[in-house]
Amino acid sequence: MKAKRLNLDKADMVFIGLVIINICASYLVGSTGIYAATAFREYGKIDLFNAMFVIEPLARSISLLISGRAGEYFGRKQLYIWSVGAFALSVGISAAASSGTVFLIARGASGFFWGLFFANVFTMINDIVSEEEYPVRIGIMQTVYSLTLILGPVLCGIFTERWSWRISLAILFPLFIIGMIFVGFFMPRSKTKNRIIIKSSIKEYDKGENLHINRSNKEELFIVKLLKQKGYVTIILITFIATCISCSGNYIPLYAQTVLGANTTISAVVLAPCNIFVMILSSASGIYISKKGCTKMIFILMSGAILIGTLIYVLTLFISSYFVIILSTAIIGIGVGIHQVVPFAFAQRHLDDKLIAEGISFISFVQGIAGVIAGMIYSATMRNGIAFSLAFTVVYSVSLILIAIFKYKVPQGEK
């Protein structure tokens, strides 16, 4: 009993370390509009600001595609510590950059190294907790992520105003060190899955029976194996569409400033109700999945909330008010909060054990690519006005709920 308690303590310490690093990453993402815009203005290179939103996501998407396989090959702990260290170093170079070009390259490198450890975080959590506890932990982590997205820009603004944008980045280094110590000290070194805790129920091997093995014993590409897993293609479609819709949040502050005439502070607060719902639903959906599994109902609830929110977006074509935009984004936040958990929980529950890391990595890659493609589509539709661009998301949401109703089926073996 004593040994088991020690193992639980180790799992908790590793999880705390992962959460701390995740806070640093979400702070950087949520505060980009403050420290990056300030930096490029200081350099006199404001034209590079838009370029950063192309280079960084593309670099992250490339690394996300290989992160799952790299984690299996080098060992997830080893890859995580190395990539987080490189990520912290690139942030340091950004903070000390003497020109806009150096800053841009460093931020691109940050995106690449972030992608390397980001997807492996979800797999590492799978390595240290039981199957039932996994969605709860993911829900907690995504809740902290959303909370940091709310508070991060405020703190970054305070640090920038009181000291400088360079200090707003350098302030993260103690957190990087603490997080890496927790993971480095308590996570066992291994190239293969090594559970830290053992609970009464261990994953049954029957999930492995779902893996289609080439009878000629020839090694198949991992993507072919993934796409053969029951329900995985549907999850990929849902992930892609839901991510495209969630990207509309990037344009809400612009809508508030241009259409509603809000100042910078007010335009940032408009999304607060949305992020609060994302935060609440991330935890709630994690608890639900741990008890009920990845049911059809939770996918319909997710897509239904998003559909209602995007239908309210349509009202912005005729009505310009804070109430309409806050209501629409808040309801969409319900669906986005659920979506932050269900794809990863599905992969952990229903993919063959040997494909979980690569499956989660590919889901993250799809989210990154969806963000890039969505940005292009939003830019194109915005020629007809930002309200039209927001209203266009109805096309996505209708497709999403049809897929959830008619295509998603709970794979056999759901607990």
Image (cartoon, rainbow, N blue to C red):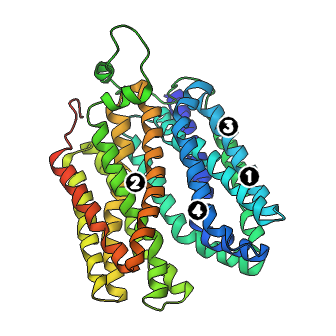
* Marks 4, 3: nearer the viewer: 4
Q: How much space separates mark 4 and mark 3, taking CA atoms?
A: 32 Å
Residue at the spot of label 2:
340
Give the amino acid type for the residue marked by disc 2 in the picture: Gln
C-beta proximity under 8 Å, tags 1 and 3: no
Image coordinates for residue 310, horizontal then vertical, percent: 28, 70
Image coordinates for residue 184, horizontal then vertical, percent: 67, 37
Q: How much space separates mark 4 and mark 2, taking CA atoms?
A: 22 Å
Give the amino acid type for the residue marked by disc 3 in the picture: Gly
Question: Which numbered disc flags the more N-terminal residue, 4 or 2?
Answer: 4
Residue at the spot of label 3:
184
Residue at the spot of label 1:
90
Question: Which numbered disc flags the more N-terminal residue, 4 or 1?
Answer: 4
Q: Please say whether residue 226 is visible from this viewpoint.
A: yes
Q: Residue furthest left?
A: 406
Question: Which numbered disc flags the more N-terminal residue, 4 or 3?
Answer: 4
Residue 53 circle label: 4
Task: Tell me the residue at 21%/44% (across/down).
Answer: 408
Image coordinates for residue 8, horizontal then vertical, percent: 51, 36
